[in-house]
Image (tube, helix red, strand yellow):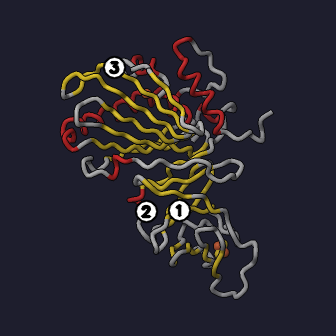
């Protein structure tokens, strides 16, 4: 797909954890072709239940492991000459040869599976993970509803979507809702995480309460929103936005509410969410990425986000 984001100036593909699939879509024995970080990969679930991700192209003659590949025990078998790769990317078996060539391997990507999603660690320089995918207590709590899932692909650099959260002004002009400005911002110890609390009275289906909107961000791709303030009730949303390449992003969202809110808030929340995304879409589909935007005094939080985001980019080989 070509668009305004193919133009130079985008910051590259960020480093971090990004979802590449819903767990439910990858049962045991499944082989999936996936493309993120501008890379072709194969995702498979072994017989013992572990999700694994490898570079897609076989070390032998370059067949795509996901196009006809099959899971054999703990390995994926190439469709072309049946070499078998384990989850570390090593060829462990060639059915017609005793000796396995020492270079018979492909890159294995670090995988973490939790919260109903399969995450892959991307690092442009190949460095290992230096932070963890968060555990979300709401997802394993019987007081909370089964999460509803929602996903969409957007033709923008993924940073544009992360930035949207830090742009209170656009909530008014694009979404017709007053943006609640952040009232408190806290960074985690390692600087990869931050939390923004916005407090103020807000109308809800249960009446008007002094609400606390708590937004957490882990790296460039992962974030959550907790709505607190209605007595004995809560709303929770988690999202992962993954770079497909420099001009395309893939977002996955999940929502859950306390059971007492399920009927009232669940539907409304999802409807509001999808409406909101459609409103952003026309902007996203047609904008360019401004590396050095002209900001005004109301953009304090945006500026802060841009500064923070720099830590997730490796220097680009083609940068001057
Ligand atoms: S290309 Fe994969 S085994 Fe030959
Ligand atoms: Fe928006």
How far apart are the two marked residues, 2 and 1, measured between alpha carbons? 8 Å
Residue occupying image coordinates x 30% and y 37%: 235
In this rendering, the answer to whether 221 lies above or below 85 is above
Callouts 2 and 1 close, C-beta under 8 Å? yes
On residue 25, which mark appears? none
For label 3, the residue is: 200
Q: Which residue is at the far right?
A: 320
x then y, percent, for residue 315 = 74, 39
Residue nearest the viewer, comparing 184 with 268: 184
Mark 3 and mark 2 lie on one chain; the one further toward the N terminus is 2
- Left or right, 213 with respect to 3, comes to left
How far apart are the two marked residues, 3 and 2, measured between alpha carbons? 42 Å
Label 1's element? Answer: strand
Q: Cβ(mark 1) to ligand 1 < 8 Å?
A: no
Label 3's element? Answer: strand
Where, quadrant-wise, is the C terminus in this rendering? top right
x then y, percent, for residue 268 = 25, 34
Q: Which residue is at the far top?
A: 297
For label 2, the residue is: 26
Mark 1 and mark 3 lie on one chain; the one further toward the N terminus is 1
- Left or right, 205 with respect to 11, comes to left
Residue occupying image coordinates x 34% and y 46%: 138
- Left or right, 314 with respect to 30, comes to right
x then y, percent, for residue 20 = 50, 52
How many circles with numbers are drawn on the protein? 3
On residue 43, which mark appears? 1
x then y, percent, for residue 3 = 58, 34
Mark 2 and mark 1 lie on one chain; the one further toward the N terminus is 2
């Amino acid at each position: 797909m070509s668009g305004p984001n193919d133009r130079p100036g985008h910051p590259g593909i960020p480093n971090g954890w990004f979802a590449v699939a819903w767990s439910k879509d990858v049962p045991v024995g499944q082989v999936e072709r996936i493309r993120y970080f501008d890379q072709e990969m194969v995702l498979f679930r072994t017989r013992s239940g572990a999700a694994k991700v490898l570079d897609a192209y076989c070390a032998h003659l370059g067949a795509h492991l996901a196009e006809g590949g099959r899971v054999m025990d703990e390995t994926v078998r190439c469709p072309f000459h049946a070499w078998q790769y384990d989850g570390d990317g090593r060829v462990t078996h060639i059915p017609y040869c005793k000796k396995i060539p020492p270079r018979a391997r492909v890159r294995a990507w670090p995988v973490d599976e939790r919260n109903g999603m399969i995450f892959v660690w991307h690092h442009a320089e190949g460095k290992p993970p230096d932070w963890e995918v968060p555990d979300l207590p709401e997802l394993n709590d019987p007081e909370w509803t089964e999460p509803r899932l929602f996903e969409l692909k957007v033709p923008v650099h993924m940073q544009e979507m992360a930035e949207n959260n830090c742009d209170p002004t656009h909530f008014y002009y694009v979404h017709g809702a007053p943006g609640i400005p952040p009232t408190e911002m806290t960074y985690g110890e390692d600087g990869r995480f931050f939390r923004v609390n916005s407090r103020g009275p807000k109308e809800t289906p249960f009446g008007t309460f002094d609400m606390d909107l708590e937004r957490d961000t882990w790296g460039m791709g992962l974030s959550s929103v907790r709505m607190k303030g209605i007595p004995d009730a809560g709303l929770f949303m988690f999202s992962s936005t993954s770079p497909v390449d420099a001009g395309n992003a893939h977002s996955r969202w999940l929502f859950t509410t306390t059971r007492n809110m399920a009927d009232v808030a669940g539907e409304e929340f999802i409807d509001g969410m999808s409406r909101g995304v459609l409103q952003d879409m026309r902007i996203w589909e047609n904008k360019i990425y401004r590396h050095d935007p002209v900001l005004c005094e109301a953009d304090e939080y945006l500026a802060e986000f841009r500064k923070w985001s720099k830590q997730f980019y490796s220097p680009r080989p083609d940068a001057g």
